[in-house]
Amino acid sequence: MTAYLITNVSVVGAAPTDLLIRDGVVAAVGAGLSAPDAAVVDGTGLVALPGLVDLHTHLREPGREDAETVESGSRAAALGGYTAVCAMANTSPVADTAGVVEQVWRLGREAGLVDVQPIGAVTAGLAGERLAELGAMADSAARVRIFSDDGHCVADPVLMRRALEYVKAFDGIIAQHAEEPRLTEGAQMHEGEVSTRLGLTGWPAVAEEAIIARDVLLAEHVGSRLHVCHVSTAGSVEVLRQAKARGVRVTAEVTPHHLLLTDVKAETYDPVYKVNPPLRTATDVAALRAALAEGVIDIVATDHAPHAVEDKECEWAYARPGMLGLETALSIALDVLGPQWDLIAERMSRAPARIAGLDSHGLDPVTGVPANLTLIDPAARRTIEPAELASRSRNTPYARMTLPGRIVATFLRGEPTVLDGKAVK
Ligand code: DOR
């Protein structure tokens, strides 16, 4: 196994130092290290962060390998600075049995580019009618701890309660896609001034807020862990703030696109901007940014949602919701938060690793820890060209935008998955 000496690098924004990576771990940290057998990576001007961890990735395999595979999504993740991703369950077949979650987990190991931690479905077939085999998935080789019907809301309060009760035994988490379905029938975009003007059916903020309010009460009642996916409204932030103040065991994520883009994008009728929950207003964006800085929202998660061309490049009403995220998330975070490296490390690596229980991830590079890390050039700017992305899909909302920051290298257990900004395999 090759050793790597990263010289003159800023670790999470601190004064430059050297990092020696050997045998899968950070072997030494300090200025003036020497290791004649090591390959040298010049870290001048670069920032080292613990490898990013995405709690919300759609890898599409099994079932829609034309849109993404575990391997192509893993490569996109590594190029985005990630060392671990949690794969959502809305595949075909749905990841609602030990067999399917083990398949995804095994494909992740074979690709070997990031650690792929499967999320299991809460309900069989995501149908919202009866619980999936939560215990069997937890006991499987994939050791599932997070369950989600993402893409669909667990709308039935009795099922939600039972799911929370079930996972309490092993300190599992129910990750909710908060959308009251009766309030969003036929919805095409955020309900507000823009939807009224465009004549498109609206998805009101209250459809999200009502479910979050219900679920924090259920989680409090049961004493279980709830995670709220892709929080998108200012009102949701207030519900979460109150719940956290009461000590409810709730965590929450926000996506890069909800931190940057607004519903005004729908005026283009370009379905690349169609996403669920929808892009909201500038007031919501400001509240989400403040909540992320404050910690009411714990993490940034991509909701990387690759879609094949025929599912996206069609009329707005028929297009599938979702956008790519893995290869641009760090740049958007840098754009939105500025070079607050400790905050970025916390929201994109340490906290998601803690929530998901991925013990070898989310650790700052100090001597002895597994060498899962990423090197960023914050001074670089790059223009996003969809054709150059590693994802099999092209549905990025940032096409031809120039964004700050570039991932120079990513290491998974001491092995480079990305070097010189390029995937190693
Ligand atoms: O926009 C979305 N796309 N939101 C979801 O909840 C699901 C996702 C998908 O699977 O495409």
Image (cartoon, rainbow, N blue to C red):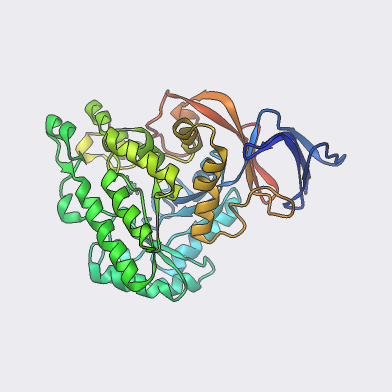
Left or right: 22 in relation to 150: right
* Residue 383 point in image, percent of width and height: 48, 23
Task: Give me the residue at 33% from left, 37% from top.
Answer: 285
Left or right: 110 in relation to 251: right
* Residue 237 point in image, percent of width and height: 32, 48
* Residue 291 point in image, percent of width and height: 38, 44
* Residue 166 point in image, percent of width and height: 38, 75
Measured along the vertical axis of the image, is residue 102 above or below residue 361? below
Measured along the vertical axis of the image, is residue 176 above or below residue 304? below
Task: Give me the residue at 33% from left, 59% from top.
Answer: 243
Task: Give me the residue at 59% from left, 48% from top.
Answer: 113
Figure quadrant of the C terminus: top right
Measured along the vertical axis of the image, is residue 20 above or below residue 377? below
Task: Give me the residue at 59% from left, 60% from top.
Answer: 359
The residue nearer to you, when weighing 170 against 132, is 170
The residue nearer to you, when weighing 261 against 152, is 261
User: To which quarter of the image does residue 373 belong?
Assistant: top right
In the displayed orientation, state which residue is furthest to the right.
Answer: 36
Total marks shown come to: 0
- Using the rendered image of the protein, determine whether residue 59 is visible from the camera's viewpoint: no
- Using the rendered image of the protein, determine whether residue 247 is visible from the camera's viewpoint: yes
User: To which quarter of the image does residue 12 belong?
Assistant: top right
Left or right: 118 in relation to 286: right
Left or right: 155 in relation to 395: left
